[in-house]
Image (tube, rainbow, N blue to C red):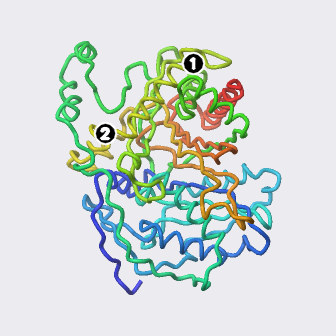
Amino acid sequence: MSEKAEFLRYATPNEMRTIVREDLGFYHAVIIGAVYEFEDGFDVKSPSSYFAPLKRCIDQHPFFSVTVGDRHTEKAFYQRVPSINLEDHITIVDDSNVAADPLGATGKVLVPELDLPFTAGNPPWRIVVLPLNPFECFIAFSFSHMIGDGPTGIAFHKTFLVGCRGTPVVEPAAIVTPPANPLTEPFDTPERLPISWKFLLEPLIALFMPNFLVKLLGMRLGASTVNEGTFTGGIMTHNPEKYYTKLRIREIKAPLVHNAIWAARAHDAKLTGTMQTLIARAVSKAVPDPKFTNLVAETPANMRRSIGVSNDVDGQFVSGGYIPFPRSDATGPLTDKEWASASASTRELAATAVRLHDQPVGLLRYAPSIRKWTLSKIGKSRDSSFSVSNVGAFDVSQGDGVTEKETARITKMVFAQPGHVASSPLSFNVISVKGGDLVYTVTWQPGSLGLGLSEEQEDKVVEEICASVDQGFKDLA
């Protein structure tokens, strides 16, 4: 590009965490995908069909027109590019088996995208289009965590859908000029996320005290709640030559989702807490070693509500928590004890999502070097048993409102992210359409379960875990 990019602002500590992670090759693309249905006249196989919707997204979401400068340093910054060639951000793929197995074909689209680095100099996002038939396609919005969290992907599709329904006054060209809109104010600032001395120093003090005294005083050893009986999989490793993401994709039909939501409400719980409990039971069954007495679920929390920011705003507004679950060997419907765990998790997540003081993500500003802190994790034990990221249900009435004849609509959503190098061994990524089906993916790094199994055997373990979760939904009915 002949014109120079415009400096916008330096990255915050949490933004630096995602920048460093990607620069080290630990993590690449987050994917929020959707199945779109179009009226006659929309060519799903033509890149130009997507120019107008993409331009609308760029106009409304400032992070979609930025790149990250000096990402190899401790002072990375965001800069706006002078122009974007949309053709560089659109890929259309084909799958001869798509009619027979559309969900499987969707999974095949996700796998290579998750580990594919973004092109230097271009804003780090792209769409991958898989035509399902002449009037329907799956569109994967693949984007860097450096420019947004999971809800950012939801916001993209909401805006993109409006663009698909509209008729542009002037047909946009492939090269667009981003508007000079400022980036959203960062979330993880000292003003927004105050940290108490107790929260800051307690883990450090606990390191030098006898374990029995730490337990007696109820002191934290860290942000997580793992102990010697927690299943945490294998140690954190990264071999650039051998690293890649494994993925399984599963679908829970709308009636089962509806039943699960009502069963959860009857037990003072929500769907995320209920899924955590089902997964904890499934992992307990798949990992029979009696030395593992408990599991810890890592769960991100969307913090937009806590600061009065709309879910339509792009950027990083995430914190999270670590929630313990006892090992469960139960079968059939969830037991009273398991429902108690689901309810406790629901309350904890709700409290986390509105609390601004003493958030773990706020501790990052005290790290002298985010890069050294990230690298220091390699070779150490993981901090959780699994993670559950639920970005919620896409409201199909969103967009430009109810029209007499919708020219485009979304019927299914999919969410995936890479297998984690420096956190949980298994990542469950959950999304649904309001009133419709729920889709979840499971991603992991080969060997991350730490069970000493071959890759094929490990695949079977994950299949067993998924089968148990699916059965759990059926048992809730």
The image position of residue 193, as x and y in percent, is: 27, 45
Looking at the image, tell me whether mark 2 or mark 1 is earlier in sequence order. Answer: 1
Quarter of the figure that contains the C terminus: top right
Name which residue lies at 21% across and 35% down: 200
Is 77 left, or right, of 332 in this rendering? left
The image position of residue 87, as x and y in percent, is: 58, 77
Name which residue lies at 47% across and 56% down: 28
Residue 363, relative to residue 13: is it above or below? above
Residue 477, relative to residue 3: is it above or below? above
Residue 89, relative to residue 194: is it above or below? below
Quarter of the figure that contains the N terminus: bottom left
The image position of residue 182, as x and y in percent, is: 35, 70
Judged by depth in the image, the label closer to the viewer, 2 or 1, is 2
**Disc 1 element:** loop
Of residues 183 and 429, the one nearer the viewer is 183
Residue for badge 2:
359
Is 258 left, or right, of 368 in this rendering? right
The kind of residue tagged 1 is Pro
Specify the quadrant of the image occupied by residue 52. bottom right
Residue for badge 1:
288
Specify the quadrant of the image occupied by residue 401. bottom right
The image position of residue 264, as x and y in percent, is: 59, 28
Badge 2 density bin: few <14, some 14–19, many ≥20, Cα 10 Å: many
Name which residue lies at 23% across and 43% down: 194
Name which residue lies at 62% across and 42% down: 440
The kind of residue tagged 2 is Gln
